[in-house]
Amino acid sequence: MGVFSSFKIGFGSWIHRIFGKKRAKIGLYGPPNAGKTTLANKIVKDWSGGTVGTVSAIPHETRRAVRKEGVEVRSNGSSLQLDIVDTPGMATKIDFKEFMAHGMSEPEAKKRAKEATEGVIEAVKWLDDLDGILLVMDATEDPYTQVNVTVIGNMEARRLPLLIVANKIDLPEASPSRIKAAFPQHAMVAVSALEGKNIDELYQAIAANFG
Amino acid sequence: MDLISAEKLEKMTSMEKIRLILDKVKTGKIVVLENGLSPDEEVRLIEITMTEIRVDEFSGIEIESYPVKKEGSFLNKLLGKAIKGRMTVIGPANQLRTIEKDQFQISTKVSVGD
């Protein structure tokens, strides 16, 4: 069995070398409402068709991690097979009253809050099973959130590749330079996942960082 | 408010630190850790916080620390052992609010309980 497994791994590497293809399991992380699912949908739509999940202005719309396997991203003559994992927004607090402020009834808000806490736990668990991370930040917001600091600290401690995506640059108040100044040691791409702005630069950065 | 020294934290296991923090924060205390938590301890704290959130009782924590700093020898850096936690403030989400934060300063607002 061990010999067979080694043979499979060795054969796989050989195939990858011949055809220049690699595979990586990449998680999309970030605070709620940073645009993770919008970005995941854009990547999946561009390279394999379909969508990953629904988007909403109400925080914690994604409350279960969703994995889309075998999304082949091609850039600069190389090809990379990605398993895209869209994770629920990471947070340190969840108050059902916040959802009621968005027009939800109290029972709906409490149910969403319960599911959101489970979603955060799921996002934390996924950290152990990834090859790299796209950390999605809302470029209109302060980048020094604890979620950003914690995710970056974890990737550095695990020595796994991290690419910061400064999202929502279609909005006039967006300031990707503020994100770059906050975390200068990491690669960053400024995009609008909603409008597809700079998305080719993102694919080049994905190929360069995870390939 | 409780300020916990680096010496005390060094003698504790990760789970002991997390339990200490949550027990204090759930009774309305603000906790300041001299040396903070490791990145792994921070995510475990978030994870356990989520399991303890209760409607109308505990809505979670506000936690603020500076980005981690790599220190130590070249060998420790190579082995990934040079990442140190930094001063961290943690409190109940309904009492502690971050006003502003940058690489060098954290400004928070504390609401005194009812």
Image (cartoon, coloured by chain):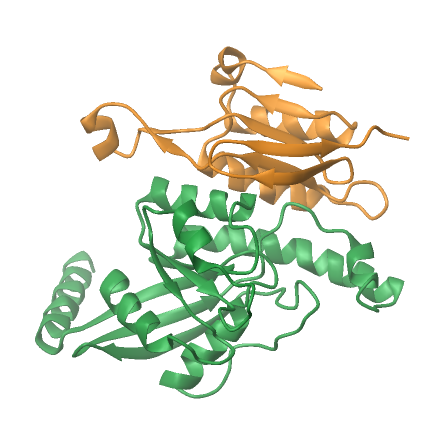
Chain colours: A green, B orange
Write down the quadrant of residue A79 in the picture: bottom left
Q: Residue furthest top?
A: B7
Q: Residue at the bottom extreme?
A: A49
Q: Position of residue B72 (x, y in %)?
A: 27, 23
Q: Quarter of the image containing the N terminus of chain A?
A: bottom left
Quadrant of the rendered structure where residue A130 is? bottom left
Determine whether, in the image, residue B40 is placed left or right of residue A140.
left
Residue at 12% across, 74% down = A15
Q: Where residue A210 appears, x then y in whole percent?
A: 27, 62
**Residue at 12% across / 69% down in the picture?**
A11
Frontmost residue, A145 versus B33: A145
- In this view, the residue in front, A191 or A84, is A191
In the image, residue B77 above or below residue B46? above
The residue located at (74%, 56%) in the rendering is A114
A165 above or below A55?
above
Quadrant containing the C terminus of chain A in the rendered view = bottom left
